[in-house]
């Protein structure tokens, strides 16, 4: 099957990330999509600019209309940002029969109703997973994964800048304006931070989430937004003492009287998973009548996390265009003829670190024997703790944490440790993962 | 468009939940799917048994073949469980051109390759979201939402019984066998708990997740499984002291040497979100090269959470059969003609609880004045804390937590409180949500 041609509008952070992901994962992607996906054209204001991506092989131009009017382009990916100008571009692309993928939250929140109406009329797809919560597939989760539910409410940390500021305020007892200045220096916050810290950006995303959750029109003008600039270090501290964390949440709730759409700082119980979402990370908690509470967590911004959703949308479009409906998504995600017989390792070959607990006689040299055996098997020790003997016992518990090692070596070492006269009973071995 | 007829095999917990969800959410579901979905037939071994669902209007029979051979049935939903017998049933259903939805993890893990091959040949869909992690749409997230990524590894708490036991051991310092006995009494654990606590059930689910993550055949026989019965209260305690939690994880990792597929107890750093997934809840952490780490959390079992995924799969099939590919999933999740103009409330009508911080003079009667004003506006107080004056100040900070109230009342009360002579400055008001 011939490759599908994609035209990219915008070669900034997300545009560059999209080029990189599509190139680096080309094999994986065509195994999944059943077809090659190629960016053949791209537009950018300044073609001389340094890019995070290699644009070799891409026909570049400064005018997005070159792409929109190119009959060889089937999918237009809009990563320029902004609203009015881009709206006209996309309406024209739809008019020309192109499918559209966009990461543009303000565009969808403000003009989505009009854009979708036109797309439906022209029979093209407009996909916008990347518009909310970056790499988290939250649109798909709500729109398809939870489609059997009446959504009762959702609450999300959907602005990374705001969450970074609140996290720093709590972790380091700092003041809002102090952290904001740092976030601006680090590039997490814009020179004009209003969009982020006053809840406008979160309001755009909430508008989209509420529409797909409740089946209501996009209506950003009805979202109540309140920023985090009035939150003081004292509030963070008092909240903490009461067992709460302060998070800037977008909340949409379907009540008997109507729908609440609100973005504001919120005290939430510290035991909730979402209360522990820190730094620039995003998370959305969705409450459905059947599923109960479910949470979706990940990077809400950044070149490649956002590109992850952009590319997923492109693949979605390609799968829709390429397969009959019954085979749209292959059962095992990859096309049946692309399933690979990669060897599955035996446990001897696992590589992980370990927690070891053993009981030893309280005699000199025990620890030396144990650590020598580990060293002989190239196992590095991360930490050792020797405990008091347990009540009614003379043996002392020794706990070791090791660095990553081959399981075969660990098994051999454990056999030798258990054979030591000074060690009683079995070594309790539990694997350890950082999951970082 | 005429309704789509679904036949249900099995009317146990998940079967009953599926009947209930499809009935209760019928309006919502047809607004999303663009078509009514009706269970017209169902089979169960014992038709006289008490059910959690109302089977009125469903043609019942004891023989599943009645349904499989019924030409009016387009989708067969298998919720019987078990492998060999059910495999034959489903192969026959596929042979008859039925689409299949199943929650059967062991069936897919052990016989999925054969079932999918036959389904592809016959051009029918076999959907199995409910087979892994109950209500969490993790299959869809990996298969579609993260399709642009090379998945590097995934790690999941995918057995609720095991997680319940480990959580109880940690929270209450209890022993494994003690908690297991309780879990059996509560119905969380089977009389023969081997499947759950020895990692077989998690191994089945891991088999499925690994296949869709890496594009490898289903191969349960190559999964390394180790149970949690050797974990002692001491290990849990020592791990805690070192900053770790012990979780029973299913881990699939794509390494340069091959793929690791392993289920075992694992020490993980306590600051990780997944380390804080407790009780019977499930969560899957997925690491992709573009998206980074993302986490999916929710109920991993139970009648309605599992039904949530079963019904989502049914809707997926209906959407595929009913719409042209471009309109498979409506832009805003609901069909364009089913978007409802539910009123969006003004902030005056929000109902939430509040954290209030105010500065008052250290004089008798201040608190009485404040609490009287709140009472006059029907605002109940949950907690009051009076703090020491801050350095260099004479005013004392008072913090109040309120119960849920109408925002209009709160605004009026705050205006009055700020007008008190004994209160200095503004009241800092932050909304509060339990998110429970």
Image: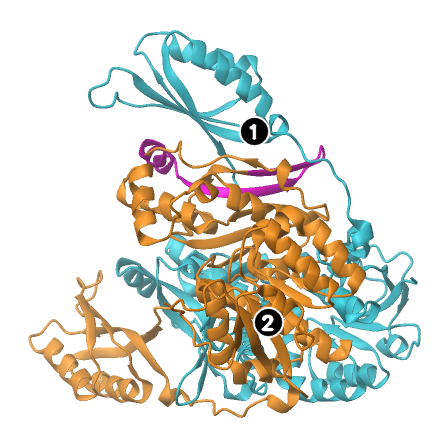
Chain colours: A cyan, B orange
Image position of B335 with respect to B158: above or below: below
Q: Give the quarter of the image for residue B427.
A: bottom left
Q: Residue at x 36, y 67 (%)?
A: B436
Q: Nearer the viewer, residue A9 or A36?
A: A36
Q: Nearer the viewer, residue A93 or B232?
A: B232
Q: Give the quarter of the image for residue A341.
A: top right
Image position of B68 with respect to B198: above or below: below
> Cβ–Cβ below 8 Å for labels 2 and 1?
no
Label 2 CA crowd tier, 10 Å (few <14, some 14–19, many 20+): many
Task: Kindly identify which residue carries mark 2.
Answer: B7
Q: Residue at x 30, y 63 (%)?
A: A239
- Tell me the subunit letter for badge 1: A
The label number, if any, that marks residue A404 in the structure image: 1
Residue B310 falls left or right of residue A343: left
Task: Report the Cα–Cα distance between label 2 and label 1.
Answer: 51 Å
Quadrant in which the N terminus of chain A is drawn: bottom right
Residue B246: horizontal and vertical position, in percent?
A: 42, 40
Residue A185 visible in the snapshot: no
Quadrant in which the C terminus of chain A is drawn: top right
Residue B408: horizontal and vertical position, in percent?
A: 31, 89
Secondary structure, mark 1, is loop
Residue A335 lies in the magenta-colored region: no
Q: Residue at x 76, y 78 (%)?
A: B326
Residue A86: horizontal and vertical position, in percent?
A: 74, 81
Residue A148 falls left or right of residue A23: left
- Tell me the subunit letter for badge 2: B
Q: In front: mark 2 or mark 1?
A: 2
> Magenta residues?
B233-262
């Amino acid at each position: 099957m011939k490759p599908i041609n994609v035209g990219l509008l915008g070669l900034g952070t997300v545009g560059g990330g999209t080029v990189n992901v599509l190139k680096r994962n080309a094999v994986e992607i065509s195994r999944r999509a059943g077809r090659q996906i190629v960016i053949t054209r791209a537009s950018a204001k300044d073609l001389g600019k340094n890019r995070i991506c290699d644009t070799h092989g891409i026909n570049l131009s400064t005018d997005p209309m070159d792409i929109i009017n190119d009959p060889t382009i089937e999918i237009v990916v809009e990563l320029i940002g902004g609203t009015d100008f881009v709206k006209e571009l996309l309406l024209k692309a739809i008019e020309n029969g192109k499918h559209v993928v966009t990461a543009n939250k303000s565009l969808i929140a403000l003009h989505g109703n009009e854009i979708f109406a036109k797309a439906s009329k022209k029979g093209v797809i407009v996909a916008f997973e990347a518009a909310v919560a970056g790499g988290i597939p939250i649109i798909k989760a709500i729109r398809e994964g939870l489609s059997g539910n009446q959504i009762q409410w959702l609450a999300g940390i959907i602005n990374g800048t705001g969450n970074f500021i609140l996290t720093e305020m709590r972790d380091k007892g700092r003041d809002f304006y102090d952290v904001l200045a740092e976030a601006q220096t680090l590039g997490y916050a814009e020179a004009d931070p209003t969009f982020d810290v006053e809840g406008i950006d979160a309001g755009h995303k909430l508008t989209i989430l509420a529409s797909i959750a409740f089946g209501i029109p996009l209506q950003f003008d009805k979202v109540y937004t309140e920023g985090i600039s009035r939150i003081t270090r004292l509030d963070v501290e008092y909240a903490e003492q009461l067992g709460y964390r302060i998070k800037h949440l977008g909340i949409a709730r379907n009540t008997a009287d109507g729908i609440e759409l609100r973005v504001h700082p919120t005290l939430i119980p510290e035991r909730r998973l979402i209360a522990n979402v820190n730094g620039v990370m995003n998370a959305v908690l969705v409450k459905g009548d059947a599923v109960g509470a479910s949470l979706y967590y990940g990077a809400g911004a950044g070149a490649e996390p956002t590109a992850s959703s952009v590319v997923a949308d492109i693949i979605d479009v390609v799968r829709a265009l390429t397969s009959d409906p019954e085979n749209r998504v292959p059962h095992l995600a990859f096309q049946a003829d692309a399933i690979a017989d990669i060897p599955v390792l035996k446990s001897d070959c696992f590589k992980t670190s370990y927690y070891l607990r053993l009981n030893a006689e309280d005699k000199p040299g025990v620890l030396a024997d144990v650590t020598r055996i580990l060293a002989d098997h190239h196992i590095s020790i991360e930490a050792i703790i020797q405990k008091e003997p347990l009540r009614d016992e003379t043996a002392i518990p020794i706990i070791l944490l090791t660095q990553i090692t081959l399981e075969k070596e660990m098994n051999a070492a454990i056999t030798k440790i258990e054979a030591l006269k000074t060690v009683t009973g079995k070594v309790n071995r539990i694997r350890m993962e950082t999951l970082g």
